[in-house]
Image: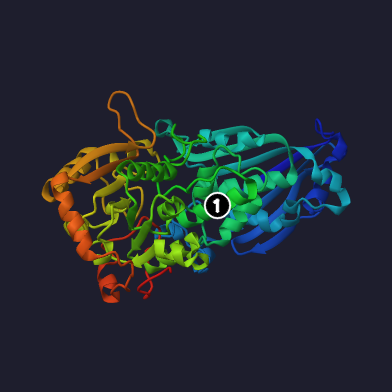
Amino acid sequence: MLVTLTTTAGAPAGSVEHGALLDATDLGYLLHKHPARAQSFDLPVGTAHVFYPEADAARCTVALLLEVDPVGIVRNKRFGGRDAFSLAQYVNDRPYAASSMLAVALGAVFRTAMTGRCDARQALADGPVPLEIHVPALPCRGGARLAERLFEPLGWSVEATPEPLDPTVPEWGDSRYVDLRLTGTVRLADALHHLYVLLPVLDDAKHYWVTGDEVDKLLRAGEGWLAEHPERDQIMRRYLAHQRRYVEDATDRLVTLDGVAPEEGAAEGDVPAAGSDAVGTAAPTLARQRAEAVLAALHEVGASSVVDLGCGEGALLRLLAADRRFTRVLGTDVAARELEKAATRLRLEDASDAERERVRLVQSSLTYRDERIAGFDAAVLMEVIEHVDPPRLGALERVVFAEARPGTVVVTTPNVEYNALYPSLEEHGHRHTDHRFEWTRAELQAWADGVAHRHGYAVTFRDVGPQDVGPGALGSPTQMALFTLLPPLLSERASTRRHAGSDNTLEPGSVSERASTRRHAGSDNDNDDATDQAEAGA
């Protein structure tokens, strides 16, 4: 893997107050690497070599060459990205194409330069310098246009040349690799931060396990530019390996640190892959639009008590809890670990007794009867049913519509027809690996009409998210079914509710029941590995 940085002598326009780069070899001071020496560094990802192919007063170039040992990486338990299947562990592009491993090398070898500190030339380190950056082999999932959308807002002129799949067979077209050249007058520390974050974003892969520490790394490297970047949401999703809990954490922290408009992190696959016209706007994420559509439906029907079935980490619960029109809120999930995260997100530990009585969490399966979810004005299944095995949908129907029987049921689920606008998805692929199915609009309507007919509900359908229009329109990315209990049965529901009582006490769920149903029902999250706790939260 190779990246080069080149600078030329002369004061950058508008930066005289910071001092002029009168000698191009001052780049060695800024990088803390002497131009007359070749240095090597042993890193977890391989051996990094730093050398200067050219270094004179007019022009200076530093090269970082990362020598990767794929077999050694396989044997290192820390590593194991999405491409860690049998053959790809040994035969792949990792020794040659820039990726997250090159970003790791940049962060390790040029750590001091990335802090912006240079005691010998601090004025130069504080100001912009003319730079040319060349990455000759870069995986770019989204094409050259994505590279332009990521780097141009940061002040770079971008030349991304697609590499042919096989130069001898031009009809095969271009590969996913580009030859990337960036030119601009940018502070060196900022330039290194841009590469550190955006190289793995362009590759859309991490070659090591992503943990919560990655959020800290992203916010440090993105300080001063990430919050306002037009591709911010996509950058966070890709950098954090599409793990929703980390994306939401990063978004929340950006709100606090940078004062950007708060919005929910998108769930898996909610935003079309790079290269789609639907990406790159500053509009609210689909996750936010979906939650707002659910809230609007609940307000429309006048619900005051709501149960969020399959609540996951509490993305919707947080909005429900903040809306005082909802006097009783219950969140359920099959995974106790997710409920613990929801409790933390809702800050229930620090809440008053009245608030803990108003907002509660309980472990429960959607395919087994649970009296605790009965007696609510409305129930919500937001991006949940697609996680249920199709043979278990009948059990979910019975539990929700026949036994719990709320006055309103709000169901949202992906519209599989819209997947055609997600170029990174394989044909017939799902937006998330845990999805058991994804329905067309006709399939959702057929299921919902049958449920409504069998249980005495009326049902209407709504679109959520950006609309695909024109001939052969694909609709919206999310589809909603809104079920309303028909008037002749409302008195029956009220009677049932009176008999059920208004006791809000939540008893622990059955651990054996959870174990037997865990694989059949889950929330919209990345890891449904429940612990042996029966209840989480207050």
Residue found farthest to the top: 471
Does any portion of residue 21 appear in the rendered image? Answer: no
- Residue type at mark 1 is Asp
Q: Is residue 5 above or below residue 519?
A: above
Residue found farthest to the left: 454
User: How many residues crowd around disc 1 within 10 Å: few (fewer than 14), some, or many (20 or more)?
Assistant: some
* Coloration mode: rainbow
Residues 414 and 295: in front is 295
Name the spot of residue 120 as percent of width and height, x first: 88, 51
Secondary structure of residue under mark 1: helix
Q: Name the side, left or right, on which 63 lies relative to 93.
A: right
- Total number of numbered labels? 1
Q: Name the side, left or right, on which 28 lies relative to 377.
A: right
Does any portion of residue 385 appear in the rendered image? Answer: yes
Q: In this view, does 534 lie above or below 215?
A: below
Q: Quadrant of residue 396?
A: bottom left
> Residue at position x 41%, y 67% from top?
337
> Residue at position x 63%, y 50% from top?
196
Q: Is residue 189 above or below residue 74?
A: above
> Residue at position x 48%, y 49% from top?
265
Provide the residue designation for mark 1: 252
Name the spot of residue 381 as percent of width and height, x first: 30, 52
Name the spot of residue 43 as percent of width and height, x first: 64, 63
Q: Quadrant of residue 328?
A: bottom left
> Residue at position x 74%, y 58% from top?
39
Residues 131 and 400: in front is 400
Q: Name the side, left or right, on which 145 lies relative to 536.
A: right
Which quadrant is home to the C terminus? Answer: bottom left
Name the spot of residue 331 as percent of width and height, x first: 36, 60
